[in-house]
Amino acid sequence: MARAGKPAPALAAAGLAAIATLPGVGPQMSAKLAERGLETLQDLWFWLPRGYEDRTRLTPIRALQSGVAAQVEGTVQAVERGFRYRPQLKVALADESRGTLLMRFFHFRSQQANQFQPGTRVRAFGTPRPGQLGLEMVHPSYRVLGDEDAGLNDRLDPVYPQLEGVTPATLKRLIGEALKRLPGEAELELLPADIARALELPALREALLTLHRPPADADLEALQSGHHPAQRRLALEEMLAHQLSLRRQRIAMQKHAAVKLGASVRLAERLRASLPFALTAAQDRVFAEVRDDLAQPHPMLRLVQGDVGSGKTVVAALAALLAIDGGHQAALMAPTELLAEQHYNTLRAWLEPLDIHVAWLAGKVGGKARAAVLQAIANGEARLVVGTHALMQEGIVFHDLALAIVDEQHRFGVQQRLALRDKGRAGEDDASSRVPHQLVMTATPIPRTLAMAAYADLDVSVIDELPPGRTPVQTIVLTSERRPELVERIRAACAEGRQAYWVCTLIDESDEVIAQAAQGTYEALVAQLPELRIGLVHGRMAARDKQAAMLDFKAGRIDLLVATTVIEVGVDVPNASLMIIENAERLGLAQLHQLRGRVGRGATASACVLMYQSPLGQIARQRLETMRETSDGFRIAEKDLELRGPGELLGTRQTGLAAFRIADLARDADLLPQVQRIAGHLLKEDAACAERIVQRWVGGAARYASA
């Protein structure tokens, strides 16, 4: 095997050769392929089929099943061209089984229609469906047979993802040409021989050839579901490349220096003594993990997960006090002004009695107030700075930033997190620079498998215990036809002194989406419930008006708050015990779970009603059933991963996981322990091999995942 660090000549020459070196590929074709990231022969090797058609056998027409793709062969019995609503070509086929199948075409040329003369033998592949006169195939793939065309395919037929401007036949031909230049096994394989053998999976060359040219006896079901050993071999290497990329980022990050914190815990102990509640065992455990990290001379990189209401802010405050106690600054950044301001109010109430200046910086802070805040940050008077992405702007200079805390970090782009990290740089160059410790928080539970893959550069802590006194929330799923009952339920709840949310998914009416808009719902509820004080909050309101409505609701001056999903995070009103989410079928599980977390924050029994518009799709039905069955954020996150995939769950701005070409984290989760072991071994024993694997799958794209 070609050793890592010495690129195999055959691999370098073949894999990295431009697609333009293939016969029949000119500048125009090269440009079309490059638009989809296909530039080298290696890109074509890894452009895998999205499915397969079994053209290795013929199915008698009488044996066809509706919805089951099949290949048939028959004689043209009749041909009809019609123009009833649009041009149509109908061709009736019959075979020896005395069955009849109609082929129907809506897009055709005269030359094509003239091929179908009665008596002509035709072989067609497609998915039959019921028609007026029996089964029919709409736009099947087909060919007219001559005397020499009696043979069947000896392999399953690959179906590749479509490329605009490139016909399927052309793409198949190009991939075939590229495969002719596939190097031998020794040159293509990047994994050390002992690791490759231990996988009990095919070699990479064998896996690629199997996936592009599956033999007739290949397990079609396994191929279609992504569980074939050849697919798992490629998925493992792709996941390994991403794991290596992240872990190398972590190693590079930890080469920087960071100030050691935690020598004094005086302020942290004073805060704990002043709180009206005791920390849970989970909060204590996570704070101990954070404290251990902060005591190191290299930067902490820790993600703290905790379900809605688990008490992450207290842990963040205690960590900030360790920095402040050492004479340094800390900063907390949140994605929205609403959430950032809530953090600011909470932290100021906790820390100002300890004589700590907490500063507030958001986009709306301007003029003399902004200048004063900037000066306090620059001269160190502001010991803790809370704000939005405004903290990362060029004009913001910290006196001595030692800890950067990022809340709901999946809502930030990774470059934004880098910018906050750079605020703490001190030193002549990158090698000598000192960077802040990083504490990243999220209330969006991340499945363990996803955390292992997406956050390989971070240590992960989980606050898996809710504070005492939180009441379970009853979740009810109702059709929108029962809306009048819900209006009466709100009337009764508010008459007893409780408060309620009514959540809508749109601001304005839309003809395209069947959803009640917040404005229209607000007006309707004001008319139906004249005795109640009703407020309205949505994303297009001025920040001042939005904040005023939220404060009125929190103070009890509003009984019912009609809102969009802007209230998903950061709103804490213990007296709110009823939530109605309209058109709940339009929201993802994570969002539904976050919204539900706004109720049940006090001692009163609470309920969340998921109101849906019929008919429900299969995925929407599964989401609502999951919400009704469990309130465990991690179980909900696992289901969300299964239904939506990692790209949507984390947001593509955070991670390149959505760009996985072959691997599927929900499907291939069982490979992760192997991936982690191999990554650890390669980083320790064969860094050059790790580099080649990253280059093959991730390329030179900077992930910034250790930001």
Image (spheres, helix red, strand yellow):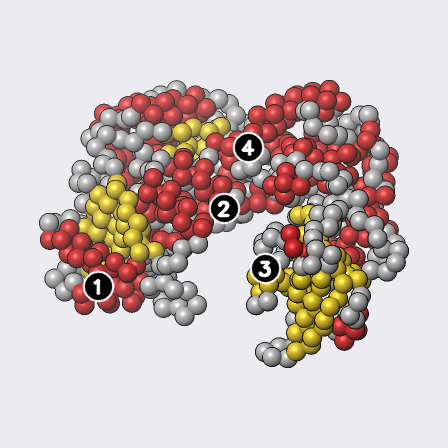
Which residue: 83% across, 39% down? 182
Q: Amino acid at mark 2?
A: Arg
Q: Earlier in the sequence, mark 4 or mark 3?
A: 3
The residue under label 1 is: 525
The answer to which quarter of the image holds residue 239 is top right
Q: Earlier in the sequence, mark 2 or mark 4?
A: 2
Secondary element type, mark 4: helix
Q: Residue 270 at what x, y percent from top left?
A: 26, 25
Q: CA distance from mark 1 to mark 4?
A: 47 Å
Q: Earlier in the sequence, mark 1 or mark 3?
A: 3
- Is 178 on the left or on the right of 351, as rendered? right
The residue under label 4 is: 669
Which residue: 63% across, 63% down? 136
Image quarter hosting the N terminus: top right
Q: Amino acid at mark 3?
A: Arg
The residue under label 3 is: 129
Please name which of the two marks, 1 or 3, marks the residue nearer to the observer. Answer: 3
Q: Residue 520 at what x, y percent from top left?
A: 29, 67
- Is 81 on the left or on the right of 548, as rendered? right
Secondary element type, mark 1: helix
Q: Eyeballing the image, is 448 above or below 343?
A: above
Q: Amino acid at mark 1?
A: Leu
Q: Eyeballing the image, is 215 above or below 176?
A: above
Q: CA distance from mark 2 to mark 3?
A: 29 Å
Graded by Cα atoms within 10 Å as few (under 14), some (14 to 19) or many (20 or more), the crowding at tag 1 reads some
Which residue: 24% across, 67% down? 523
Q: Earlier in the sequence, mark 1 or mark 4?
A: 1
Please name which of the two marks, 4 or 3, marks the residue nearer to the observer. Answer: 3
Please name which of the two marks, 1 or 4, marks the residue nearer to the observer. Answer: 4
Q: Amino acid at mark 4?
A: Ala
